[in-house]
Amino acid sequence: MKKIRTTITTGVASLGLVVGMAGFAGATTGTIDTTGPNSENHIESDLKWEVDVDNDNDVDVDNDNDQRADSGDARTSGNTTGGDATSGDASNDSTTSTSLSIDNSGSAGSWSMPSSSSNSATIENTGPRSDNTVEFDSHYELDVNNDNDVDVDNDNDQNATSGSATVSGNTTGGDATSGSVSNTSSTSTTISIRN
């Protein structure tokens, strides 16, 4: 009796891989019909689904704010009657705001594990003493690596100096008023990382 060997391996496996990657659900269908007795019939499907996502975020934020406010000297000197001497005001105002948002969730979140594979195989009318084999093999793997390096440096140097107020060498000394000195700084840093 002549042995007829029918093997569906490469074609069916390729079909499963293409469909699996396109729709994330492997669907393989194989049919063997009417082979002679003592035949060997095999339907094999090998679906391999792998996704590797690497997110590498390097963020460096540097805020350098140097402020200096000096009020001038106020002097009344060497007069019979000293008048008023008033130094002007000195003021610094600075506002720094840094907002950073990194969202890597879409890179892996959009990938969903495949649903149950819908595989079907039919072997019919193979004759007596036939060896029939159906095998479906599915392998799913998702690898996500997130590497987040964030460095934030806020440097705020403030210096405020009020000038001298001097009344000297006058018969009648007037008022000498040094001006006001003010530094104002507001720094806000917000970092949001979602993996």
Image (tube, grey):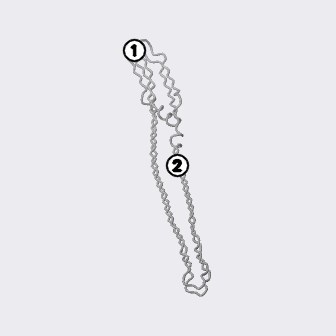
In the rendered image, residue 40, in percent from the top left (x then y), is placed at 40, 19
The reply to whether the C-beta atoms of the residues labelled 2 and 1 are less than 8 Å apart is no
Q: Residue 115 or 124: which is nearer the viewer?
A: 115
Task: Give the residue drawn at x 48%, y 54%.
Answer: 152
Q: Relative to 164, is 57 above or below? A: above
Whichever of labels 2 and 1 marks the residue nearer the N terminus, that label is: 1
**Residue beneath disc 2:** 102
Kindly give the residue lying farthest to the bottom in the view shown.
Answer: 80
Kindly give the residue lying farthest to the top in the view shown.
Answer: 128
In the rendered image, residue 192, in percent from the top left (x then y), is placed at 54, 48
Decide: few, some or many residues near mark 1? Use Cα within 10 Å; few <14, some 14-19, many ≥20: some
Left or right of residue 179: residue 153:
left
Amino acid type at image mark 1: Asn
Q: Residue 77 or 157: which is nearer the viewer?
A: 77
Amino acid type at image mark 2: Ile
Figure quadrant of residue 143:
top left
Q: Relative to 90, is 191 above or below? A: above
Identify the mark at residue 38; answer none if there is no mark: 1
